Amino acid sequence: MAENPFQVNVRHLEVRSRRLEGTAPVESLELETRDPLLQLKEPLEFNLLVEQVGAGLLVRGKLRLPIHCECVRCLKPFVHFLELGDWVCHVPLEGEESAPVVGDLVDLTPYVREDIVLAFPQHPLCESECNGLPGLHASDEGAQSVEQTPAKAPGSIWDQLDKLKLS
Protein backbone atom coordinates (compact mmCIF):
# COMPACT_ATOMS: atom_id res chain seq x y z
CA MET A 1 0.00 0.00 0.00
CA ALA A 2 1.35 3.43 -0.96
CA GLU A 3 2.06 6.02 1.73
CA ASN A 4 -0.65 8.63 2.19
CA PRO A 5 0.93 12.04 1.44
CA PHE A 6 -1.71 13.82 3.54
CA GLN A 7 -1.06 11.99 6.82
CA VAL A 8 0.65 13.96 9.58
CA ASN A 9 1.89 12.86 12.98
CA VAL A 10 0.41 15.13 15.66
CA ARG A 11 3.26 14.35 18.08
CA HIS A 12 5.80 15.72 15.58
CA LEU A 13 3.69 18.86 15.16
CA GLU A 14 4.03 19.59 18.90
CA VAL A 15 7.73 20.27 18.22
CA ARG A 16 7.55 22.07 14.87
CA SER A 17 5.35 22.63 11.83
CA ARG A 18 5.60 20.30 8.86
CA ARG A 19 5.67 20.99 5.13
CA LEU A 20 3.85 18.61 2.79
CA GLU A 21 4.67 18.96 -0.89
CA GLY A 22 4.62 16.85 -3.98
CA THR A 23 1.98 15.15 -6.07
CA ALA A 24 -0.79 12.74 -5.22
CA PRO A 25 -2.63 10.49 -7.67
CA VAL A 26 -6.31 11.39 -7.94
CA GLU A 27 -7.17 7.77 -7.12
CA SER A 28 -5.72 8.26 -3.62
CA LEU A 29 -8.11 11.19 -3.09
CA GLU A 30 -11.12 9.09 -4.16
CA LEU A 31 -12.48 11.98 -6.19
CA GLU A 32 -15.60 11.41 -8.23
CA THR A 33 -16.68 14.06 -10.69
CA ARG A 34 -19.99 12.37 -11.58
CA ASP A 35 -19.92 14.60 -14.64
CA PRO A 36 -19.01 13.19 -18.06
CA LEU A 37 -17.62 16.60 -19.08
CA LEU A 38 -14.93 16.46 -16.35
CA GLN A 39 -12.15 13.86 -16.27
CA LEU A 40 -9.32 13.61 -13.77
CA LYS A 41 -6.25 12.17 -15.52
CA GLU A 42 -3.33 13.92 -13.85
CA PRO A 43 -2.12 14.07 -10.23
CA LEU A 44 -2.85 16.78 -7.71
CA GLU A 45 0.10 19.08 -6.98
CA PHE A 46 0.30 20.40 -3.43
CA ASN A 47 2.50 22.55 -1.23
CA LEU A 48 1.12 22.76 2.31
CA LEU A 49 2.29 23.89 5.73
CA VAL A 50 0.70 22.10 8.70
CA GLU A 51 0.89 23.67 12.18
CA GLN A 52 -0.64 22.78 15.49
CA VAL A 53 -2.77 25.65 16.78
CA GLY A 54 -4.47 25.05 20.10
CA ALA A 55 -6.63 21.95 19.92
CA GLY A 56 -6.46 21.70 16.15
CA LEU A 57 -4.34 21.87 13.05
CA LEU A 58 -3.99 24.79 10.70
CA VAL A 59 -3.23 23.77 7.11
CA ARG A 60 -2.23 26.45 4.60
CA GLY A 61 -0.86 26.32 1.11
CA LYS A 62 -1.53 25.65 -2.54
CA LEU A 63 -3.44 22.95 -4.38
CA ARG A 64 -3.39 22.58 -8.18
CA LEU A 65 -5.29 19.98 -10.18
CA PRO A 66 -5.54 19.80 -13.99
CA ILE A 67 -9.06 18.81 -15.04
CA HIS A 68 -9.70 17.59 -18.57
CA CYS A 69 -12.99 19.17 -19.60
CA GLU A 70 -15.34 19.30 -22.53
CA CYS A 71 -16.86 22.69 -23.29
CA VAL A 72 -20.61 22.71 -22.64
CA ARG A 73 -21.20 24.97 -25.66
CA CYS A 74 -18.91 23.69 -28.42
CA LEU A 75 -17.84 20.26 -27.01
CA LYS A 76 -14.17 21.16 -27.59
CA PRO A 77 -11.79 19.42 -25.16
CA PHE A 78 -9.61 21.67 -22.98
CA VAL A 79 -7.72 21.56 -19.70
CA HIS A 80 -8.94 23.65 -16.78
CA PHE A 81 -6.48 24.19 -13.93
CA LEU A 82 -8.25 24.13 -10.59
CA GLU A 83 -5.99 26.26 -8.41
CA LEU A 84 -6.51 26.96 -4.75
CA GLY A 85 -3.61 29.36 -4.22
CA ASP A 86 -4.35 30.55 -0.70
CA TRP A 87 -6.02 27.42 0.66
CA VAL A 88 -6.56 27.42 4.42
CA CYS A 89 -8.18 24.69 6.48
CA HIS A 90 -8.72 24.22 10.21
CA VAL A 91 -8.79 20.60 11.36
CA PRO A 92 -10.20 20.21 14.89
CA LEU A 93 -8.58 17.53 17.07
CA GLU A 94 -11.13 17.79 19.89
CA GLY A 95 -14.88 18.06 20.04
CA GLU A 96 -17.80 16.68 18.12
CA GLU A 97 -16.39 17.27 14.63
CA SER A 98 -12.80 16.33 15.42
CA ALA A 99 -10.64 14.51 12.92
CA PRO A 100 -9.91 10.89 13.84
CA VAL A 101 -6.41 10.36 15.25
CA VAL A 102 -5.16 6.82 14.61
CA GLY A 103 -1.83 6.01 16.22
CA ASP A 104 -0.86 9.71 16.40
CA LEU A 105 -1.66 10.13 12.66
CA VAL A 106 -4.27 12.48 11.25
CA ASP A 107 -5.41 12.09 7.64
CA LEU A 108 -6.02 15.42 5.89
CA THR A 109 -7.35 13.76 2.72
CA PRO A 110 -11.08 14.33 3.47
CA TYR A 111 -10.48 18.07 3.95
CA VAL A 112 -8.46 18.36 0.73
CA ARG A 113 -11.06 16.32 -1.18
CA GLU A 114 -14.00 18.40 0.06
CA ASP A 115 -12.54 21.73 -1.04
CA ILE A 116 -11.46 20.36 -4.42
CA VAL A 117 -14.93 18.98 -5.12
CA LEU A 118 -16.49 22.32 -4.14
CA ALA A 119 -14.19 24.09 -6.62
CA PHE A 120 -15.01 21.85 -9.62
CA PRO A 121 -16.25 23.91 -12.59
CA GLN A 122 -20.04 23.68 -12.78
CA HIS A 123 -20.36 24.90 -16.36
CA PRO A 124 -16.99 24.31 -18.11
CA LEU A 125 -16.34 26.70 -21.00
CA CYS A 126 -13.27 26.60 -23.24
CA GLU A 127 -13.36 30.41 -23.23
CA SER A 128 -15.86 32.92 -21.92
CA GLU A 129 -16.74 34.13 -25.44
CA CYS A 130 -17.39 30.62 -26.81
CA ASN A 131 -20.25 30.79 -29.34
CA GLY A 132 -21.01 27.09 -29.31
CA LEU A 133 -21.06 24.64 -32.16
CA PRO A 134 -20.54 26.13 -35.63
CA GLY A 135 -23.79 26.17 -37.59
CA LEU A 136 -26.01 26.34 -34.51
CA HIS A 137 -27.97 29.33 -33.38
CA ALA A 138 -29.34 29.59 -29.87
CA SER A 139 -32.93 30.71 -29.38
CA ASP A 140 -35.59 30.54 -26.70
CA GLU A 141 -36.71 27.19 -28.09
CA GLY A 142 -33.20 25.70 -27.90
CA ALA A 143 -30.43 25.26 -30.45
CA GLN A 144 -31.60 25.27 -34.05
CA SER A 145 -29.62 24.58 -37.18
CA VAL A 146 -28.74 27.62 -39.26
CA GLU A 147 -27.47 27.27 -42.77
CA GLN A 148 -24.47 29.45 -43.32
CA THR A 149 -22.23 29.80 -46.27
CA PRO A 150 -18.66 30.95 -45.78
CA ALA A 151 -19.20 33.79 -48.27
CA LYS A 152 -22.14 35.38 -46.45
CA ALA A 153 -22.59 35.59 -42.71
CA PRO A 154 -26.08 36.09 -41.30
CA GLY A 155 -27.15 39.74 -40.92
CA SER A 156 -27.73 41.39 -37.62
CA ILE A 157 -31.10 41.50 -35.93
CA TRP A 158 -31.21 45.25 -36.60
CA ASP A 159 -31.09 44.60 -40.37
CA GLN A 160 -34.24 42.53 -40.01
CA LEU A 161 -35.96 45.24 -37.96
CA ASP A 162 -35.10 47.87 -40.60
CA LYS A 163 -37.11 45.85 -43.13
CA LEU A 164 -40.30 46.15 -41.06
CA LYS A 165 -42.96 48.48 -42.49
CA LEU A 166 -44.85 49.99 -39.61
CA SER A 167 -47.06 52.48 -41.50
Image (spheres, rainbow, N blue to C red):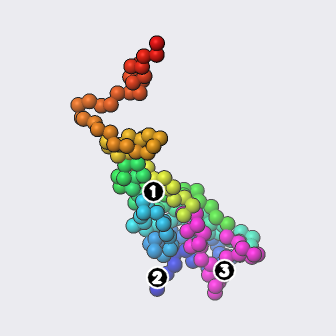
User: Element under label 3?
Assistant: loop
Can you identify the residue that label 1 sits on?
A: 81
Q: Position of residue 15 (x, y in %)?
A: 67, 76
Image quadrant where residue 113 sits:
bottom right
**Residue at the far front in the pictured view:** 167
Of labels 2 and 3, earlier in sequence is 2
User: Element under label 1?
Assistant: strand
Q: How far is disc 2 from disc 3 in space, using C-alphas? A: 20 Å
Image quadrant where residue 39 sits:
bottom left
Labelled disc at residue 2: 2
Q: Cβ–Cβ below 8 Å for labels 2 and 3?
A: no
Kind of residue indicated by mark 1: Phe
Q: Residues within 10 Å of mark 3 (few under 14, many from 20)?
A: some
User: Element under label 2?
Assistant: loop
In the image, the segment drawn in magenta is 91-116
Q: Position of residue 150 (x, y in %)?
A: 24, 35
Of labels 1 and 2, earlier in sequence is 2
Kind of residue indicated by mark 2: Ala
- Give above or below for 82 relative to 92: above
Q: Between residue 20 and residue 163, name the one nearer to us.
A: 163
Q: Residues within 10 Å of mark 2 (few under 14, many from 20)?
A: few
Q: Is 128 on the left or on the right of 100, as rendered?
A: left
